[in-house]
Image (cartoon, helix red, strand yellow):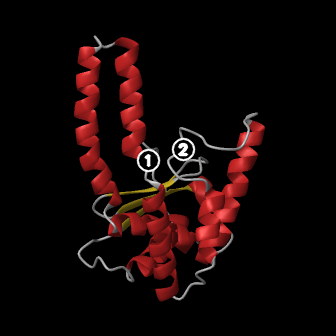
């Protein structure tokens, strides 16, 4: 809660938990107990942590145009857990962190060490394009099994892409690759989904 903000309680949080449970019941990982939480922030974000912890922001919920689109987001994040992406990234992050520390010591710390640490943190937090596509694919599978329209993954990603472009325009940025993005370009993901 200190890192990500206050968790919401009440009808909206309960609704997300019900939809999440419906999606999670259709995964291949019956050994995982999924826990769904809503973070009270307007920021558009969703992520999953090892052990079945799935978080969505209030801002992301505002982009979902239907229960099926919410299920698509939750299915995607559950897909990361199913495929063990977060655990894999954390294991790799330990090795990357050791390398960053060694470079920082060799360079005498300072700006070089800070830059290497920033790079390693971005590497740890980001999923590869292949991992994102796999999570989309798994999410579509779970949507279908739960009785939702699997095309909802693509329709939500279109909304997310439009929101991203609007935010870039408002911030005076041009489109294209963003080094601080933890997901591949959503137009590519829409086509794939």
How far across and down, in percent of the image, does residue 39 sit? 49, 52
Q: Is residue 104 left or right of residue 152?
A: left
Looking at the rendered structure, the secondary structure element under dot 1 is loop
Q: Along the line of sight, which residue is nearer the eye, 86 or 45? A: 86
Quadrant of the image occupied by residue 97: top left
Task: Determine whether 125 is above or below 64 in the image.
Answer: above
Residue depicted at x 44% and y 68% = 134
* Residue density around tag 2, few if under 14, some if 14–19, many if 20 or more, within 10 Å: few
Residue depicted at x 54% and y 38% = 179
How far across and down, in percent of the image, does residue 149 sit? 60, 84
* Residue density around tag 1, few if under 14, some if 14–19, many if 20 or more, within 10 Å: some
Residue 14 at least partly seen: no
Residue depicted at x 43% and y 47% = 126
Q: Quadrant of the N terminus?
A: top left
Q: Which circle marks residue 181 in the picture?
A: 2
Query: In 3D space, how far apart are the residues under numbered discs 2 and 1 (Cα atoms)?
Result: 8 Å
If you read the primary sequence from the N terminus, does the residue marked by circle 2 or circle 1 appear first? 1
How far across and down, in percent of the image, does residue 101 sit? 25, 25
Task: Determine whether 171 is above or below 36 in the image.
Answer: above
How far across and down, in percent of the image, does residue 188 sit? 62, 61
Looking at the rendered structure, the secondary structure element under dot 2 is loop
Quadrant of the image occupied by residue 100: top left
Residue 114 at least partly seen: yes
Q: Which circle marks residue 12 in the picture?
A: none
Q: Quadrant of the C terminus?
A: bottom right
Q: Is residue 63 left or right of residue 101?
A: right
The residue identified by callout 1 is 126
Q: Along the line of sight, which residue is nearer the eye, 15 or 10? A: 15
Task: Determine whether 157 is above or below 106 in the image.
Answer: below
Q: Is residue 130 left or right of residue 99?
A: right
- Residue contact between numbered discs 2 and 1, judged by CB atoms under 8 Å: yes
């Amino acid at each position: 809660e200190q890192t990500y903000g206050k968790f919401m309680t009440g009808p909206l949080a309960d609704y997300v938990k019900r939809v999440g449970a419906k999606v999670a019941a259709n995964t291949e990982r019956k050994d995982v107990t999924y826990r769904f939480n809503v973070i009270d922030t307007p920021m558009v974000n969703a992520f999953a942590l090892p052990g079945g912890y799935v978080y969505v922001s209030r801002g992301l919920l505002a982009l979902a145009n239907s229960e099926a689109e919410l299920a698509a987001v939750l299915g995607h994040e559950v897909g990361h857990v199913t495929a063990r992406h977060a655990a894999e990234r954390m294991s790799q992050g330990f090795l990357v962190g050791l390398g960053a520390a060694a470079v920082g010591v060799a360079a005498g710390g300072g700006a070089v060490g800070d830059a290497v640490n920033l790079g390693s943190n971005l590497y740890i937090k980001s999923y590869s394009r292949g991992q994102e596509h796999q999570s989309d694919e798994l999410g579509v599978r779970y949507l279908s099994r739960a009785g939702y329209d699997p095309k909802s993954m693509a329709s939500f990603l279109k909304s997310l892409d439009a929101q991203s472009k609007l935010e870039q325009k408002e911030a005076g940025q041009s489109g294209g690759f963003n080094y601080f993005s933890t997901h591949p370009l959503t137009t590519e993901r829409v086509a794939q989904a």
